[in-house]
Structure formats: structure tokens, C-alpha cells
Amino acid sequence: MKIGYNGTGDKMINYPTKKTKSKTSFVSSAHRGLSLEEDINKTNAYYLVHKRANVHKKPTPVQVVHVQYPARNKAKITEAYYKRPSTTDYNGVYKGFALDFEVKETNHERYFTLGNLHQHQLDHLQSVHEHGAIAFLLVRFSKFNETYLLTYEKLAYFLETMTRKSIPRAYFIEHGHLIPYTHIPPIDYLKVIDALLLKE
Amino acid sequence: MKIGYNGTGDKMINYPTKKTKSKTSFVSSAHRGLSLEEDINKTNAYYLVHKRANVHKKPTPVQVVHVQYPARNKAKITEAYYKRPSTTDYNGVYKGFALDFEVKETNHERYFTLGNLHQHQLDHLQSVHEHGAIAFLLVRFSKFNETYLLTYEKLAYFLETMTRKSIPRAYFIEHGHLIPYTHIPPIDYLKVIDALLLKE
């Protein structure tokens, strides 16, 4: 699988909000250059094939303005614009539970800027949480190559009790769950979900 | 809400697989011309606002080939193609359960052609069903303005026991669940889900 291919058949060409890769040398040699999104797509593909879960990235919504039909049954979109999604990027089903999460990456060392999360994504996470889904964030601190799972409850607690515009890395260390990089699958986040389900 | 607007912010312009509306006079005067997809989108919007469920239509996947940047932070897609989705169109969460379904409409009076369902959609329904999601089809026989919910189990039973390339309307009548048109929300499919959950 090549870099630039996200594992779902989408070529990620010039997508305007795509994060640039971390250029730091902190990243371990075992794991070079794949974005968290690419790692998650590979992980989900692994889960699907091994029948552990069925989780998919939603396609990026596009507002189509003009379509040409150069041939019968062949539509060529000649004018379209990216739209802001009204949900999170990932959802699916695991052990009968609905899963719903957003994937984010930051180059900051000490904090995750809340501006990375749009209000409608927060509203969506709250809504699916209230309907009983397992809702969470996956956040990678690229400089440390650390990926944390932060449950919606812990995110909501932070938002309710803090006024700051960013979540410190220390909050992820204390209230999140570090997901070790395991190669196959890269980011085995269901292990954390299993532990959380056992606790309940 | 105007016809042609599907309630999710997507204008359905020239989407190549969009069904033409039934022109028959069988359709009751209480319900003119909205496609099943538009009815389901309105129903889901109603469910969301009234906190009954969180169900969304997935964006149509588009393969973007070329993007222009006429202005900073503004991306204009100038060449793209529709892709075949690898999942069903709708999923979400209801009472903690993952919901996953496909919406189809037919103009035939006596049967629903299985060619309307792609193999990967069937595979996806089977997969999410095995992972514990509530998986089903919503099929409208436009000429009778009848919308049926057919569970994945009943669909799989038909596919396993029959060799024909279409499902007779009689099968929907016997093994499906007719969903009355109720205006607000148009197609209250969660009522059927509630009844099915009670049975289990």
C-alpha cells in the first residue's frame, strides 16, 4: 500500500484540510510517515478481513455543481466543491455496539488545539453518545508518535470544566488511553474499547 | 423543503443512478413525488432533532482527479468521477444498536430486481449483521406507494433458498413489514425496529 492511498479506494489528492506530515526525527524508525488516518484505514481493513469489526471512513462530502456525460453511463464531474461534513469521519459496528469517532493529528508537543474539532463534530459525538454509541477521539501527537483514545465522556468533561482552547497532552496521558503501534494492525484501538467495555 | 433537496445539504444534481419518479396515478394524493430517499432523509432529520436516533446518509463517494485553487483556502474540483460505494448508504445508532440499511425503489409492480443490490452491498449487510448491527433493506414499490422493511435475515433466507433474480412483492408482503406513510416523519421505520426488538 502506497503512501497517499488511504486504503478505502480514495486517493487523497490535494484535499484542502489534509495535515502535512510531521518532519521531526522523533518518529521511531518502525513507523515512518503514514498519517494517523492511513494507519486507521489499514487497521479497519484488517478488522474487516479478520471479522473483528466493520468500521469505515465516510467519503468526503462533495457539492457537485456540474456534470458532463462524455459517454452513455459515464458521468464526469467538472465542477464541485468540498463541503464541511456534518458528522465524524468514522463509524461502524463492533460487538453490536455502534462506534463513532473522529481522527486528528497535531504537530504541537504540549497540546491539542480544540479548533481542530468543529462544533458540528462535537454535537455529533454528543448525540451518538446519548444514543448509546461508543464515541471517542483518536488523537496523534506526531512529534512523539503517540496515539491516544479519548472517550467522549472525558472530552465532554474537559469542555465543561475548562475554558482553555486546547487540551494539554498531559490530559491525554492522564485521562486518555495510549494505543501502542503494533504494525499489524497499526493502531489496535479495539483493545482499548474491549478494556472499556469490561469496566462497565 | 423543496423537491430535489435531500435534507442533508446535498443537492442531487444529475446523480447518474438517481431513480426517475414514478409517473403513475396509483400514488395517493397525500404523498406526491418525493423519492423514498428524500422521505428517509426527512425522517432521519426528524429523528435527529427529536433525539430518537442518529442516522445519516453517507456522502456519495467521489474519485477526485484534479483540483484548482482559484483562491487561497478555496478548492475547486475540476475533474472527478462517481465511485461505487463499498457500503450501504445509511447507518447510525439507535438505542445503542448500530443501524445499517440500504434504500431502494422499484417501478415494477410484482417484483424487486436483485440487480438493484450490488454484491458488495450484500456483503456489507451480511458483515454488519454478523457484528450485531440491525441490518435491513427499505424497498418502495412506487406504483403502490408501499414501503417495506425487510430484515437482513429475511433477505439472506430468500437468497439462500431461491435462485430467481428478483424478490416478488408477495415475499415483502409476507416476510417484510409495511411502513405506513405518516407524514411527520414520512417513513417511521423505527416503529418496525421497536417491534422487532420487542420480539427478541
Image (cartoon, coloured by chain):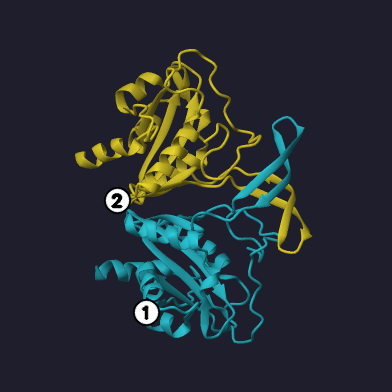
Chain colours: A cyan, B yellow
Label 2 marks a residue whose chain is B
From the image, tell me which residue sits under label 1.
A175
Q: Please identify the quarter of the rendering in which residue B156 is found.
A: top left
Front residue of A181/B133: it is B133
Kindly state the secondary structure of the residue where label 1 is placed.
helix
Residue type at mark 1: give it. Answer: His
Label 1 marks a residue whose chain is A
Front residue of A42/A19: it is A19
- Residue displayed at 55% across by 23% down: B21
Residue B99 showing in the rendered view: no
From the image, tell me which residue sits under label 2.
B95
Image position of A179 with respect to B184: above or below: below
Q: Residue A17 in the image: x percent, y percent?
A: 64, 64
Numbered label tally: 2
Looking at the rendered image, the quarter that the C terminus of chain B falls into is top left
Horizontal side of residue A67 vs A6, given as left or right: right
Image position of A125 with respect to B1: above or below: below
Q: In the orientation shown, which residue stands out farthest toward the left?
A: B199
Kindly state the secondary structure of the residue where label 2 is placed.
loop
- Residue displayed at 44% across by 85% down: A170
Q: Residue A128 in the image: x percent, y percent?
A: 38, 56
Mark 2 closeness class: few <14, some 14–19, many ≥20 residues within 10 Å: some
Instruction: Find the distance from the CA under tag 1 to the CA under tag 2.
Output: 26 Å
Q: Which mark is residue A19?
A: none
Q: Please identify the quarter of the rendering in which residue A197 is found.
A: bottom left
Mark 1 closeness class: few <14, some 14–19, many ≥20 residues within 10 Å: some
Residue type at mark 2: give it. Answer: Lys
Residue B198 showing in the rendered view: yes
Horizontal side of residue A21 vs A149, given as left or right: right
- Residue displayed at 26% across by 40% down: B194
Q: Residue A105 in the image: x percent, y percent?
A: 55, 73
